[in-house]
Image: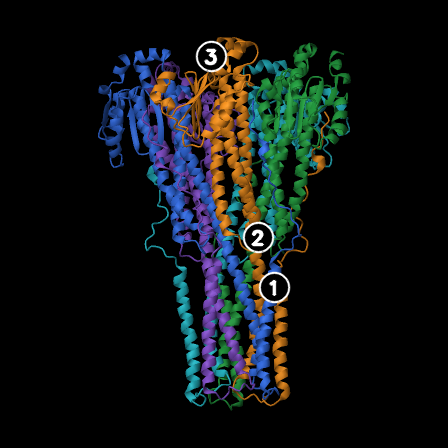
Chain colours: A green, B cyan, C orange, D purple, E blue
């Protein structure tokens, strides 16, 4: 019954006061002024049996019996505070002391925020990439590139934030002392202290809790990194696509230029016969058909020769048999299920 | 005879029940609810003399005498469970306790899954790259690029999964305590405990087992990284290929433009003589041949000059003797077999 | 009263003398010549109960009662020394000894310098990138590229400097001994020494102070890295933009070349009829309209066929139904708020 | 005399038997079946006073008196075994026990193999790069690109193998226990054990030996990495080369297009006068020369204007004085030889 | 007086002998043959109260009283040995024993060599990059690219060498034992040994000395890395420059092609009227001017329409108001000078 009383709901106080002066707060809790400066966007540490933490806009002080949220107005936190945090803290299903419940609720909120931001960015990026790598497109839609760049920037910022969150948890996980300090009830409630030598160890529970969120953040980080990689890979494919289109157009252009050249060359004969000069063929009725036929046939033949020359020219002077670049080198026998 | 009894086949129980409630399971095995939450895709830890593990879709609890697979339906695991896992667990050739056999079977299954996924992706990627870097191609086949991108994405996901698997093994290998905890039989069977001071040390065996799978995962990771590098290298080669093709076509185009220009220039003479204006050459019978010859010869000569100009123009103004960029700097004498 | 006397303002001496010889200084403070060589751009260490530090142009020696700034002339430090540092050191609000106040003022100055340099570079880079990725631009403004390159270089230098600053702090934070040495007052004032066993621990305060600046530098480093990433991403977008523009122009060019080809081809008929040769149609009044109509209609029809051929040619031979490259694979159910 | 007997040549046994069963071998040497499984391509560990190692195709068991090479047939090792390994093991110049001689010979063989593979790949890559970056080339020789890609792939595989070799040595160097275990003679020959407290320490010798090969592998790794970097740098240069060629050709093309345009424009006048329409100039003998001269002069002038317009157009609108991107910022006075 | 005698100049012997046999040397100094093998390009270790070191071409053995330089002929070291090293070793200003003076001179020589190599490479690279990123250039000067590639290769080699030098110092700095061994005099001169417990600690001095050179090497490494980054950034700018030029030329080309097309189209009318066919306009004196005017005016109008179509076509279909890609997100208020 001892423990159940320690984290009974009546001690689960919950008040938020942006009005109270920080100095008063310091005196009340025995903290120092610098402890409540919240200079870094993410911090989590214990001082004088209080946990002081900041997760972006959420600044809070956690004592063994209460959670105080500071400066929460205008941060879009109200809904979460009232709709989710309050019931979670009041719930009795949790078998661990109050600071565990509060810390878990806050860290979960942080991870959920990160997760929802990744969820906002990911489908937009996937949609845009999907449409940009479409092999039918001759040119990239440049307004989509704009949106891609915006989302790619958001993704970088998200990656940094995940990294900062992971680092701040890792710093705690690396030092057992800090974990011990975070177990507030262990030091205030002697009964818990005694029990800890028998059954549940609070420090170990705290480590599991923090590790759990560390791994969730790691998974988010992995997803963000994969998405970054996908953007890079897609850009390469876009470039190859655009280059390929260009090469095809250039070959068509070249083929037409060959045709125009042939026509111009043989058209010169027509121009020559069009000159107001004496040619001795003027009255030959077959001359017209001969010269005209020669012009059209000649340019056609020259064009055909040029086209076949182009075909040969573009094929590189490779030896007839190039070995393939790589042979299959991952044989199923390389690694077989070892029966020990 | 003591040990042989400890891991005799009759204790090798094996049942799978997705029906049983988790709460019952917890009570039965003395676990806590959060131990069976399986929040992360890969986890492996010991609690209250049970090993709880999850490898993607496979969730299992391992006690010294039994292996329980949870929620295995609809995951495509049935075949493996019945055809491979059951006989492996029942086999008597293994000299180590049951938890070793079970853990090895599961980890081997995980590594085999990763390996077969790499084996699915690799030949497709190699085939596509082989056809994309073909020097004869003027443009990259864009539907192949599409498939390459899909497989490249699968490869990234596989890399992440291998990394997560390696990290979870490494976390165990780094802490001797956790390895000790994984040796379930050591703590339950006093005879094994006594023996361990003499001959086989269970903790060392467990370390070897985990290290073995860690190294298998490392090899898979190396292969995946090489494949990624190969994609990058091939893309560079594809770009150079496409650029080279383009340059060749552009030179041909330029040469033809030069020809057309020459023809147009001298064709102007023909056009001039075609005007209905008095030229005083109208009746000279040689004039036609002279002017026509001048037109064709002149354009031919100008073209030839332009072509040779192009040839000179494209050669850069390099000093006649550029030293080669690099001299051979790896001499066989640099590193000779040292006879100690 | 004891402590307040220790860091009472009267002992807070502050003199700067570039004239004094280094050798005199060494004798006075019991330092060695090499301690005052300041070879590296960033250093911070304790010798013989003095803290010797250099932050770029600022070289200083810190004793428990005084701060001496060396060689400060012509470095643009005068303003800061007189306007900011002096009042900060003289302020009485600080409850910690003099060396804490001085160290904090100097490190804060360093971080502020780094921060203001990042603030100088960032808006320029963002402005230039914003105008370079403008999808309407056909070609990048090359004078802007020049400025981008200059700022990108400054950013690299800033990144190096942040890294060097972080490394020098990290070296101290990693060794508790060095932190102890930095707490000058602890070793000189016995009353402080005694107290430290009771209340405030100086070494811990020093660690917090250094850690605070380390994290500020880390945040700056994160921002600089994000900015670098943004430049890279924007360059990719610029390349895709330029390539897309080129492809569009090339298609237009190709379409016109097709038109010119058609006109030249059918113009040849006109040229043929312009020859001074007998055609038997000379006197047919309908012949002119027939041939002219044939020329224009024929070239129009050929052009249309060529254009539709181009349209078909640019569409790759893809199977009608390509699966999308990626399916959405981040489901909201993957990671739900875990209620413990 | 004691030591010299310990590693006298008569104990230097050397037999290779792929025929012997592994199970027999295990019984003979007191090993377990799994110790001889050789699952990983590179391994080196000690079990029951034997060193078991595998270096790619070479699998060997090393006891204090003998070296057994397993499965050596068809691996191309015969020559090395007979011509090099046997004499090296039999030589008496070595002052250290047999296992040192054998281990050194095998590791040296491994490093030599890696080195010769790098030596095979490097000159080919350098030759190809040298010819590809040749500034005279308009297009990259695509069969050379093919060979480059093959060698680049071999280089990646070599890098992985060097990394695996280094990692396996590092794992041993990091744990003094394993090094001790590798000193077989120390544990079998009591005289050596005693001596070790006086003069030569076997464990230290073993560490030096392994460290030596680790550093040789590191040098190879550095060379491979430099080569990779060189390929990347060369590819950038190739791209700039190809792009530059293209720009030059495009300018020439544009200049010719300008010429053709001028000729077409003024040729239209000729065409106009060639029409069978009344112009009132028909009989003016000067008209022909005037119009012809106007056509040629006019097109020449227009061409010239277009060319100068092109020249101006390509120069960007830069302010007249751009500061250079970077000033020299490495002054010799920054770092002067410090006289301590 | 005791110490001053220990490092008095008369014991400062200095001889270099490439003639002496290594075996003699080994016997004389009590070293083993393998200690003098100098297999790696950079090494520094203590054996039997001698420091054996190699820095590229400089191989030396350092005893408490002498420095022996081995194989120094033909390495370009003579000048440094005679002009700089000898006086530095003989100087009496140094208060520390001989091995400190010698080690400092040699390490300083190494760092100076690295520094001068960086100083050779840097201005060349900066000059070339400066001229290559010149926005006025249409094409990169390809002989400069060649030189850039050579210097970029030298830079990579220099980076590797700095890394190797840093690693070899770091290996010593990480183990206090090795630092102790390097303090030769401490172990030979009992008076120094006694003193060390009082005043100056040799091991600490040695650590400071090595750390100093480590940081100098780090600064060089940072500079080399920045230079590498600058090459990469410049290459991107060069590519954007070349691409922009190409786009501008392509637009000009396209505009001219449009003009030529218009002229060809309307020239066809002229060609039609040039045919020897009856048109009924032959004798109309206004017909010539009407048709000619229609030709010129028509082609002019069509050209204008085509140009305005091009202008519209190149503008992407962006919504009128795209939000800028990034808003300023580094506010000065984010990080303000914290007054503690």
Can residue C235 be seen here?
Answer: yes
Please give the residue where the numbered disc 2 appears in the rendered image. C241
Mark 3–mark 1 Cα distance, whole angstroms, equals 82 Å
Q: Nearer the viewer, residue D316 or A269?
A: D316
At x 73% / y 37%, what residue is drawn?
B74
- For residue E40, what is the image quadrant? top left
Q: Which comes before the other along the chain, label 2 or label 3?
A: 3
What is the secondary structure assignment of the residue under circle 3? helix
At x 27% / y 23%, what residue is drawn?
E26
- For residue C61, what is the image quadrant? top left
The reply to whether dot 2 and dot 3 touch (C-beta < 8 Å) is no
For this view, does D102 lie left or right of residue A230?
Answer: left
Can residue C326 be seen here?
Answer: no
At x 26% / y 33%, what residue is drawn?
E80
* x then y, percent, for residue D203: 41, 21
Q: Nearer the viewer, residue C153 or D154?
A: C153
Please give the residue where the numbered disc 1 appears in the rendered image. E308
Residue C187, numbered circle: 3
- Marks 1 and 2: same chain? no
* x then y, percent, for residue B331: 34, 41
* x then y, percent, for residue D160: 48, 37
Chain holding disc 2: C
Q: From this view, report whether residue E37 is shown above or below residue D48.
A: below
Q: From this view, report whether residue E80 is shown above or below residue D148.
A: above
Nearer the observer: mark 1 or 2; the answer is 1
Nearer the observer: mark 2 or 3; the answer is 3
Q: From this view, report whether residue A330 is shown above or below residue E63.
A: below
Chain holding disc 3: C
Label 2 CA crowd tier, 10 Å (few <14, some 14–19, many 20+) = many
Chain holding disc 1: E
């Amino acid at each position: 019954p001892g423990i159940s009383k320690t984290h009974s709901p009546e001690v689960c106080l919950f008040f938020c006061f942006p009005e109270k002066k920080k100095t008063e707060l310091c005196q009340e809790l025995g903290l120092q002024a610098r402890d409540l400066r919240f200079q870094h966007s993410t911090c989590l540490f214990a001082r004088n049996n209080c946990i002081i933490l900041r997760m972006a806009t959420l600044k809070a002080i956690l004592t063994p019996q209460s959670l105080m949220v500071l400066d929460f107005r205008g941060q879009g936190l109200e809904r979460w505070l009232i709709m989710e945090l309050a019931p979670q803290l009041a719930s009795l299903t949790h078998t661990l002391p109050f600071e565990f419940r509060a810390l878990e609720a806050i860290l979960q909120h942080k991870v959920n925020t990160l997760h929802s931001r990744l969820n906002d960015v990911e489908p937009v990026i996937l949609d845009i990439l999907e449409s940009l790598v479409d092999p039918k497109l001759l040119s990239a839609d440049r307004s989509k590139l704009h949106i891609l760049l915006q989302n790619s920037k958001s993704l970088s910022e998200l990656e940094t934030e995940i990294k900062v969150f992971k680092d701040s948890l890792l710093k705690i996980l690396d030092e057992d002392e800090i974990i011990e300090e975070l177990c507030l009830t262990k030091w205030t409630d002697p009964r818990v202290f005694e029990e800890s030598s028998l059954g549940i160890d609070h420090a170990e529970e705290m480590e599991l809790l923090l590790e759990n969120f560390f791994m969730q953040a790691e998974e988010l980080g992995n997803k963000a990194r994969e998405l970054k990689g996908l953007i890079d890979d897609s850009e390469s494919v876009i470039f190859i696509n655009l280059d390929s289109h260009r090469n095809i157009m250039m070959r068509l252009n070249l083929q037409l230029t060959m045709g125009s050249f042939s026509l111009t060359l043989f058209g010169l004969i027509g121009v020559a016969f069009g000159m107001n000069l004496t040619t001795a063929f003027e009255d030959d009725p077959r001359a017209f058909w001969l010269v005209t036929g020669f012009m059209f046939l000649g340019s056609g033949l020259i064009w055909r020769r040029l086209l076949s020359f182009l075909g040969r020219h573009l094929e590189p002077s490779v030896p007839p048999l190039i070995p393939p670049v790589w042979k299959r080198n991952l044989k199923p026998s390389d690694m077989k299920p070892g029966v020990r």
